[in-house]
Image (cartoon, rainbow, N blue to C red):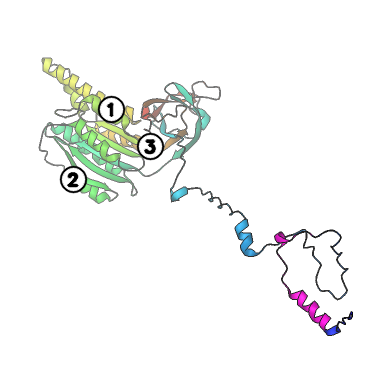
């Protein structure tokens, strides 16, 4: 006897609710059902909330399984920094620049020639023309050393030295810095660089009684150049003496090499004993007087060489009355000068000595001619050092 089962409506709803809360099987573990057993999804009802998704095409794995299946992400690339490991690197391009101090003075009046332009100058470095980048006129305070020969060899030489140093002292300005040094057997510093004129005056007034009769000029000049090289800027040495050297440890070749290698130092020499040599040198007295005259001429030639190599001037005044004009020329030279700047075509830092020659030319490259207001030609001199030492790679 067959019995007909009747389903209660409440039971049907309870079964449906339980079915909704059952967990779905894993997508990768599902077994496909036969096509005839699959049912089409029912169209969404208006009461359904949210969008419908197709669980058959996109598989969303659990977080733990996704982490196990997904490959480990690659490590991020290290950021590129300019200086790794906090190391400091720098790129330096050393373009050599040469400054040449040049003075243009009329031979007759010793006046400074103003108004010259860059195209009026021609610089030859080892015979090769250079391109001048700038030309300017400077008038600045001076830093100078008075290097005085003070030895007990002749009253006339000492008197000439005192007169010359006195006139240079009178030409100083309040902003100038001056040191006073003397030499005989050794070098003596009477006062270091100072702009106190009273201190300089006291140093000069102390030169009364000399001690030694030796004049070690080469050693004294070497030491003075060495001291001046430690000071920044342009320096001047006012060398006042006979030019004789007796027992210096250095030879003439070594002191000339030192003068060549000294940068930004100009030497002005004032020879003493010119009148004494004029009166007695070579005039009678036999062979001894002739030898003395030759020694004096050689000594003065050395003084002239020191000045010429550094772009300075050399004087041998016969009388005291010529000293004001001498120091007027020196002041005109050191306080008014052209500063020529160029980049050498030979830019090697090999420490070699480069010979430099400064010329004046016109617009067509011919030697420049000067004339006064009346049209008379005027001779002039270009005073500049004759070379410099190139830098070394380690400088």
Quadrant placement of the C terminus: top left
Is residue 312 rendered to the left or right of residue 221?
A: right
Task: Give SS at disc 1.
Answer: helix
Is residue 247 rendered to the left or right of residue 339?
A: left
**Bounds of the magenta segment:** 11-32
> Residue 216 versus residue 290: which sits nearer the camera?
216
Crowding at mark 2 (Cα within 10 Å: few <14, some 14-19, many 20+)? few
> Residue 157 versus residue 123: which sits nearer the camera?
123
Given contact means CB atoms under 8 Å apart, are the residues at marks 2 and 3 in contact? no
Given contact means CB atoms under 8 Å apart, are the residues at marks 2 and 1 in contact? no
Q: Residue furthest front?
A: 1
Task: Give SS at disc 2.
Answer: helix
Is residue 192 rendered to the left or right of residue 359?
A: left
- N-terminal of the two: label 2 or label 3? 2
The residue under the point 24% across, 24% down is 253
> Residue 341 versus residue 317: which sits nearer the camera?
341
Is residue 150 rendered to the left or right of residue 65?
A: left
The residue under the point 15% across, 21% down is 292
Residue marked by disc 2: 205
Residue marked by disc 1: 257
Task: Give SS at disc 3.
Answer: helix
Image position, residue 351 (x, y; %): 36, 29
Image position, residue 245 (x, y; %): 17, 28
Q: Nearer the viewer, mark 2 or mark 1?
A: 1
> Residue 257 versus residue 80: which sits nearer the camera?
80
Marks 2/1: CA–CA distance: 34 Å
Image quadrant of residue 273?
top left
Image position, residue 12 (x, y; %): 83, 80
Mark on residue 332? 3
Q: Main secondary structure of the magenta part?
A: helix
């Amino acid at each position: 006897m067959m019995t007909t089962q009747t389903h209660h409506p409440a039971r049907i709803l309870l079964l449906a609710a339980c079915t909704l809360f059952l967990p779905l099987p894993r997508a990768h573990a599902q077994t496909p059902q036969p096509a005839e057993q699959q049912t089409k999804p029912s169209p969404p009802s208006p009461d359904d909330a949210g969008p419908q998704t197709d669980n058959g095409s996109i598989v969303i794995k659990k977080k733990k399984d996704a982490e196990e299946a997904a490959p480990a992400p690659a490590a991020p690339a290290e950021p590129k920094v300019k200086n790794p490991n906090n190391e400091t690197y720098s790129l330096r391009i050393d373009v050599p620049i040469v400054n040449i101090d040049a003075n243009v003075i009329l031979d007759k009046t010793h006046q400074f020639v103003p108004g010259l332009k860059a195209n009026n100058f021609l610089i030859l470095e080892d015979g090769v023309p250079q391109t001048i980048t700038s030309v300017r006129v400077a008038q600045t305070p001076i830093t100078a050393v008075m290097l005085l020969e003070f030895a007990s060899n002749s009253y006339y030489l000492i008197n000439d030295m005192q007169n010359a140093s006195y006139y240079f002292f009178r030409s100083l300005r309040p902003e100038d810095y001056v040191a006073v040094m003397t030499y005989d057997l050794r070098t003596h510093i009477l006062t270091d660089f100072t702009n106190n004129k009273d201190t300089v005056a006291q140093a000069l007034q102390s030169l009364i009684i000399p001690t030694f009769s030796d004049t070690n000029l080469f050693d004294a000049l070497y030491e003075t150049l060495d001291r001046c090289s430690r000071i920044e800027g342009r320096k001047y040495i006012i060398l006042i003496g006979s030019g004789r050297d007796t027992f210096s440890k250095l030879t003439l070749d070594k002191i000339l090499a030192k003068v060549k290698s000294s940068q930004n130092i100009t030497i002005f020499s004032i020879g003493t004993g010119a009148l004494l040599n004029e009166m007695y040198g070579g005039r009678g007295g036999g062979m001894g007087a002739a030898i003395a005259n030759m020694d004096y001429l050689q000594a003065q030639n050395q003084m002239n060489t020191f000045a010429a190599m550094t772009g300075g001037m050399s004087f041998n005044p016969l009388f005291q009355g010529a000293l004001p004009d001498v120091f007027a020329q020196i002041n005109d030279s050191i306080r008014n000068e052209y500063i020529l700047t160029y980049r050498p075509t030979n830019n090697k830092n090999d420490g070699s000595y480069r010979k430099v020659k400064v010329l004046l030319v016109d617009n067509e490259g011919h030697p420049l001619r000067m004339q006064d207001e009346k049209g008379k030609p005027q001779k002039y001199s270009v005073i500049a050092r004759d070379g410099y030492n190139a830098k070394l790679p380690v400088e």
